[in-house]
Image (cartoon, grey):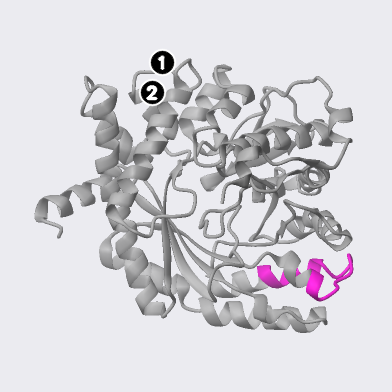
Amino acid sequence: MLNIRDILETIHMIDEEHLDIRTVTMGISLLDCTDSNVDKACKKMYAKICRKAEHLVTEADRLAEKYGVPIINKRISVTPISLLAVAAEATPDSLLQYALTMDKAAQACGVDFIGGYGALVHKGISRKERDFLLSIPHALAETKKVCASVNIGSTKSGINMDAVAIMGEVIHETARLTAADNCIGAAKLVAFCNAVEDNPFMAGAFHGVGEGDSCINIGVSGPGTVQAALSRHPDADFSQLADIIKRTACKITRVGQLIGEEISQQLHIPFGIVDLSLAPTPARGDSVARILEEMGLESCGACGTTAALALLNDAVKKGGVMASSRVGGLSGAFIPVTEDAGMIEAAEKGVLSIEKLEAMTAVCSVGLDMIIIPGDTLPEVIAAIIADEAAIGMINNKTTAVRLIPAIGKQVGDRLEFGGLLGGGPVMQVSNLSPVSFVRRGGVIPAPIHSLRN
């Protein structure tokens, strides 16, 4: 039970340390909306999304006011749309209709984003699924709120290099088609290995086929709260640091649990999970990089960064599970470069490289996230980066992802600005050594031997 001290401490976290509910995401299954006719399928989709999420924003705003807890985003995730498109035998020309329907429904419900325009092709890819992947650039260019994700590998199946090669082209083309809008389309597109079905965070959220008809998933964030807690113990050793982070994460998770349970009851939608991911923003005092520096690093990117991030990620998860039996999603620490003031600074100084970020992804929540690269980067290079990141996920049995933004018309040292939570940052250096022959081999990189555990 919360006492007055706990309540006052939580109020301080919200007022001074940037604690917030980063997202309330409603997952909606569209499996019952399949139809051989695309028009009919889209009408079913729109009706179900609007029916389920009609009061999502209103109720989230009411709870934010009731408890004084900022709820930054309200979002919807749906069944991977490729499943509906294949069932409908959709043609390449008709695929865009699904994305436009998602966007229309998201606007009608008043949410910030809708995720799920994606595919699960980690073990193989059919001709129709290939057509679907190639539809992603236009889908993201012609919509405002739609996000896309594609699972190209897993520990059990290996890495589908045919899908990886296509995704290199898709990411580059998405950036090109949205070049006039700062290549924003690529910021709404993720390539996954070991994607999870209950992730509430965009751009990778989708409602998995193993989920129920609908659910409420909560994403909580509090990098500033963790940094403030560590700053009060400058002489603590690493064991003590881990305990401080665990206690702080436990308190943060309680807030998410409270909001999740109440909004679930009010909307008569089952409560899913709390995703305790320390998701930073460009705002001062809301940075994962600053947490690592609080541990004693001169700058994020210095030697010791990966070890510090490993401690942080593990302690956050341990603290979360003490507060809730419903912790899920990606839970840990995100390292999106453009969304983290400390990482933006480190990248600008040249002390944080893509290679160092790749090493950090072995122990963080997800992977290479919101990294701006030169606009003339070859699609095969993008594909090779995806393959490298997927290999880390496959071998270590963890979720990894790649969200790269080719900055069309820009080179290393230039800047690209998105604004809002997506922030902005410098164009980072990418190796100019060619992986073209490697990527074009195609086929599947086999799953590791430990995938046979059962």
Label 1 Cα neighbours within 10 Å, binned few <14 / some 14-19 / many ≥20: some
Q: Is residue 296 above or below residue 383?
A: above
Please name whichever residue, 7 or 165, is drawn nearer the observer in this view of the structure. Answer: 165
Q: Is residue 194 above or below residue 325?
A: above
Secondary element under disc 1, as helix, strand or loop, is loop
Residue 198 appears in the picture as rendered: yes
- The mark nearer the N terminus, 2 or 1, is 2
Marks 2 and 1, Cα distance to the nearest angstrom? 6 Å
Residue carrying label 1: 298
Residue 412 - label:
none
Q: Is residue 167 above or below residue 289?
A: below
Residue sitting at the far left: 4
Give the amino acid at mark 1: Glu
Say if mark 2 contacts mark 1, CB within 8 Å.
yes
Secondary element under disc 2, as helix, strand or loop, is helix
Query: Which residue: 46% across, 78% down?
Result: 55
Residue 108 in the image: state x and y as whole percent: 59, 75
Residue carrying label 2: 293
Query: Which residue: 78% across, 56% down?
Result: 136
Q: What residue range appears in magenta?
A: 86-103
Q: Is residue 39 rendered to the left or right of residue 2? A: right
Give the amino acid at mark 2: Glu
Label 2 Cα neighbours within 10 Å, binned few <14 / some 14-19 / many ≥20: some
| Picture quarter with the N terminus | bottom left
Residue 417 appears in the picture as rendered: no
Q: Is residue 232 rendered to the left or right of residue 77? A: left
* Quadrant assignment, res 45: bottom right
Residue 90 in the image: state x and y as whole percent: 85, 72
